[in-house]
Amino acid sequence: MIELEGVPELVDPVMIAAFEGWNDAGDSASSAVAHLEREWKGEVFAALDAEDYYDFQVNRPTVFLEGGVRRITWPTTRLSVVRVGGDKPRDLVLVRGIEPSMRWRSFCNEILGFAHELGVEMVVILGALLGDTPHTRPVPVSGVTSDPDLARTMDLEETRYEGPTGIVGILQEACTHAGVPAVSLWAAVPHYVSQPPNPKATLALLNRLEDLIDLRIPLGELAEDARAWQLGVDQLAAEDSEVAEYVQTLEEARDTADLPEASGEAIAREFERYLRRRDGGPGPGGHATDGGESTSYLRDTSSGRTRPPRPPREHPEDPADPADPADPGEGTESSED
């Protein structure tokens, strides 16, 4: 049994998790949880034993000096708690770490043990995948669940993915089998600009998370970072005609696919977000900007500019579609590759 000391009774807690590695293209998901920790000053109350789950030849510990004394930081997964006040107080349990190298079932059981002891009502797992999406358009974010009832009540997709999976998929299934409501939010990152960071995708994940848990999230400088990121990618694309042509092809496919989104629920969602932020003011750290309106710098690969392959032209009317959001294993590459 897990014994927690110094952790107060939480109010309607939601657990939000993200893991560096295969399910974290552009470090977008782990950066989102790190942002929540930073803005709300999360207090770490537990860390999983690194010896149990990590191969230190894959995820090496780091050495640093503190007051002239050498210390070691071990790769692990840490849990922190943030208390959010206001008219609708709600506490969050944040889980941030690295995808484990081994013993995934035990890893998930330990996370669920904390969730049970803390009275967590729902688990939200953030992920990011590589997809055929242009950097100039709003970042697609899909919400998926294995629970058909949850899919209906929260307007989510019921996952039908089959194929290789990462810790995000395993943890979601573990939650489902344990009877804990679980949702995964997936951001699609342009495959031709996959290097971290990607603040635009991080911003899009936070906006979708805000809608899902009905909680206003302070964005700090994230919107400005996202704008700078898009400007940097714009400049890179302008210097290479092949990249510019490829981006234009993706834009045309995306615009065709998004025509139905110009009305109905999409507009209603944006209007509700606008009203929520207008009534609540900018909050600590800044104002909200939709992930699709924002923009940053690009860190290039060792070979210089990333030059994407030319897209297939047999069916130009078919929009480029990122891999099934339930898992990035199909049609994508690991963010570590």
Image (cartoon, rainbow, N blue to C red):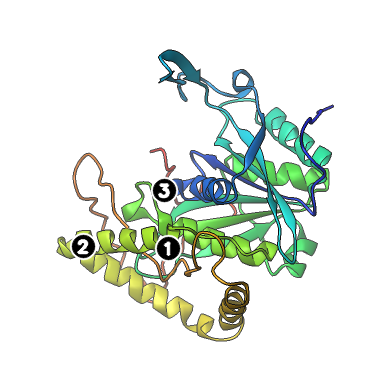
| Position of 70 relative to 133 (above/below) | above
Q: Real-space Cα distance between discs 1 and 3?
A: 16 Å
Residue drawn at point x = 68 percent, y = 42 percent = 171
- The circle drawn on residue 26 is 3
Q: Quadrant of the N terminus?
A: top right
- In this orientation, does residue 63 appear? yes
Going by the image, does 281 lie left or right of 312? right
Q: Are marks 1 and 3 in contact (CB under 8 Å)?
A: no
| Position of 182 relative to 241 (above/below) | above
Choose between 44 and 183: the one closer to the eye: 44
Helix, strand or loop under label 3: helix
Amino acid type at image mark 2:
Gln
Choose between 25 and 320: the one closer to the eye: 25
Choose between 62 and 325: the one closer to the eye: 62
Q: Which numbered disc, 2 or 1, marks the residue closer to the eye? A: 1
- Residue beneath disc 1: 223
Q: Residue 275 at x, y = what percent?
A: 61, 79
| Position of 57 relative to 244 (above/below) | above
Q: Which numbered disc, 1 or 3, marks the residue closer to the eye? A: 1
Helix, strand or loop under label 1: helix
- The circle drawn on residue 235 is 2
Residue drawn at point x = 79 percent, y = 41 percent = 8
Residue drawn at point x = 74 percent, y = 56 percent = 90
Amino acid type at image mark 1:
Ala
- In this orientation, does residue 316 appear? no
**Which badge, 1 or 3, is on the more N-terminal residue?**
3
**Which badge, 2 or 1, is on the more N-terminal residue?**
1
Q: Are marks 3 and 2 in contact (CB under 8 Å)?
A: no
Amino acid type at image mark 3:
Gly
Q: Real-space Cα distance between discs 3 and 2?
A: 19 Å
Q: Residue 195 at x, y = what percent?
A: 34, 47
Going by the image, does 175 lie left or right of 68? right
